[in-house]
Each structure stands twice: as structure tokens, then as C-alpha cells.
């Protein structure tokens, strides 16, 4: 397996896609971090304003260390904004803060995909953490050439598929949060209309990371399906 050209092709393609997505996010965020909003609102101010516009109470906003570590925790209804967002008055900060509030809006409105993703987290964590051990064991047991190998291969693939499913359901959740964010920024007059376009570019770049994660997971899943012989006949090598 370690010298399998197809394996390294899949891994390489996934790494290149992820690196490209990260570059787009960082470069776009950096560009619009230099552009100060004329409203003078910080990321935290933008978050509070959008929560007020949507009449959502009980959500706590706090700063968190790191870069682009922003997230909303639905378990405790806490919105955490990174150092580059919480107290900054940039277009990038406004866009990212609005996006995280988009998740708070989803939570308040019981948005189905968000609820499903939250419930799926422990399943994906378990599947992702154990699947590779099961797949390697399947290869060691002869893969599809033996009954035990077939069983282990099937179990391993199903476990790995839980992580692919997680990256898939993440796409509509993140896209919808950005849609809600941009709508609130524009309809609520939180920042000037011409600055919303910059926030849209920041969020569009961020969306690429989720697309890259899904494509990488899907390619890896397909590789193991072929490698184990579950599709396409496979290669039954030791």
C-alpha cells in the first residue's frame, strides 16, 4: 500500500486542493482585513446587531485566541470570535462574525441540517478514529479473498463513510449560514451595501475549505473501495 501510486495520487490531490483552499481563505481574509468598514463596527458589534435584528436572545459573544478560530457552539449558545474578528473594524471581520451568527440563527430556527450535523459529530469522530485500523486489518486478513477480510473491509468502509457523510452535510450548513449572514448585513444596513460585496468574497473563499474537505474525503473513500476490491474488482495485494 505504501508504494501504491494511486494512493499517493489521491493523497496528493487532496493536499493540493486543501492548500489551495487555505491560500484563498488567508489571502482574501488578509486583503479585506485591511479595509475598514465605514460604519466603524467591530466584529463583535456586527454579531450583536445581527442577533438583535433577528430577535435572538441568550447568545453570549466572547473572544477566542487564534486566527480564523471563529465558531458557534450550539450546546451552550456561545459565539466565539477570533482575535482578528472580535475587536477589528474590517470588512473581513464583519463577514466572518455575520457568518457565525448565521449558525446561531440556524440554531434558533431549528435548521434541520445543523441539527443533523450536531448529532452526527460523535458518529463521525468514532468512525474516523477507528476506520483506518479496521481497513488495515482487512488488508492483513486478505481483503476480499477471505470471509474475515470481506467483513472487516465492509465495516471499515462504512466507518470511514461516516466522516465523508459529515463533510457532505457540512456543505449546506455552511452555505446557508453565509446566505443568512449576507442577507442580514444587507437588509439590516449593518455595513454599507458596497462593503457587503467584500464580505461575500471572504465567505465564498471560506466555503472552499469545506468543499475541499468533502472532495478529499470522497476521493479517499473511493480509493479504499477500489483498493479493498469492493468496487472495480480491486487489487488484492498483500
Image: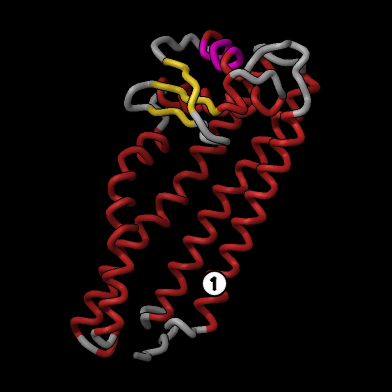
Q: Is residue 165 left or right of residue 18?
A: left
Give the answer, above or below, for where 11 lies relative to 17: below
Residue at 27% x, 84% y: name it: 140
Q: Is residue 10 left or right of residue 104?
A: right
Colouring scheme applied when the structure was drawn:
secondary structure
Residue 198 magenta-highlighted: no
Residue 174's spot in the image, x, y percent? Answer: 53, 38
Q: Is residue 55 visible?
A: yes
Q: Is residue 98 visible?
A: no
Give the answer, above or below, for where 64 lies relative to 69: above
Viewer-nearest residue: 97 or 215: 97
Majority secondary structure in the magenta region: helix
Q: Is residue 164 left or right of residue 140?
A: right
The mark tally for this picture is: 1
Residue at 40% x, 75% y: name it: 225
Residue at 54% x, 31% y: name it: 177
Q: Which residue is mark 1?
A: 10
Residue 62's spot in the image, x, y percent? Answer: 47, 19
Residues drawn in magenta: 45-51
Residue 47 magenta-highlighted: yes
Provide the secondary structure element on which disc 1 rests: helix
Give the answer, above or below, for where 199 lies relative to 118: above
Q: Residue furthest right?
A: 194
Q: Badge 1, how many Cα within 10 Å: few under 14, some, many 20+?
A: some
Image quadrant holding the C terminus, namely bottom left
Residue 180's spot in the image, x, y percent? Answer: 57, 26
Residue at 73% x, 11% y: name it: 39
Residue 182's spot in the image, x, y percent? Answer: 65, 25
Q: Is residue 63 left or right of residue 107?
A: right
Amino acid at each position: 500500500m505504501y508504494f501504491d501510486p494511486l494512493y499517493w495520487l489521491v493523497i496528493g490531490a487532496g493536499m493540493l486542493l486543501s492548500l489551495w483552499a487555505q491560500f484563498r481563505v488567508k489571502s482574501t481574509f488578509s486583503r479585506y482585513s485591511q479595509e475598514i468598514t465605514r460604519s466603524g463596527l467591530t466584529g463583535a458589534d456586527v454579531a450583536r446587531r445581527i442577533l438583535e435584528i433577528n430577535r435572538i436572545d441568550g447568545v453570549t459573544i466572547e473572544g477566542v485566541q487564534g486566527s480564523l478560530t471563529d465558531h458557534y457552539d450550539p450546546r451552550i449558545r456561545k459565539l466565539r470570535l477570533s482575535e482578528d474578528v472580535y475587536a477589528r473594524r474590517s470588512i473581513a471581520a464583519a463577514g466572518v462574525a455575520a457568518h457565525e451568527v448565521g449558525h446561531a440563527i440556524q440554531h434558533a430556527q431549528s435548521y434541520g441540517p445543523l441539527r443533523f450535523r450536531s448529532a452526527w459529530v460523535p458518529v463521525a469522530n468514532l468512525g474516523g478514529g477507528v476506520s483506518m485500523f479496521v481497513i488495515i486489518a482487512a488488508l492483513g486478513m486478505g481483503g476480499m479473498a477471505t470471509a474475515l477480510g470481506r467483513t472487516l473491509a465492509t465495516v471499515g468502509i462504512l466507518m470511514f463513510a461516516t466522516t465523508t457523510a459529515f463533510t457532505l452535510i457540512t456543505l449546506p450548513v455552511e452555505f446557508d449560514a453565509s446566505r443568512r449572514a449576507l442577507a442580514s448585513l444587507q437588509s439590516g444596513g449593518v455595513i454599507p451595501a458596497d462593503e457587503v460585496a467584500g464580505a461575500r468574497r471572504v465567505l465564498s473563499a471560506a466555503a472552499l475549505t469545506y468543499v475541499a474537505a468533502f472532495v478529499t474525503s470522497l476521493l479517499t473513500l473511493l480509493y479504499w473501495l477500489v483498493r479493498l476490491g469492493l468496487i472495480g474488482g480491486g487489487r488484492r495485494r498483500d
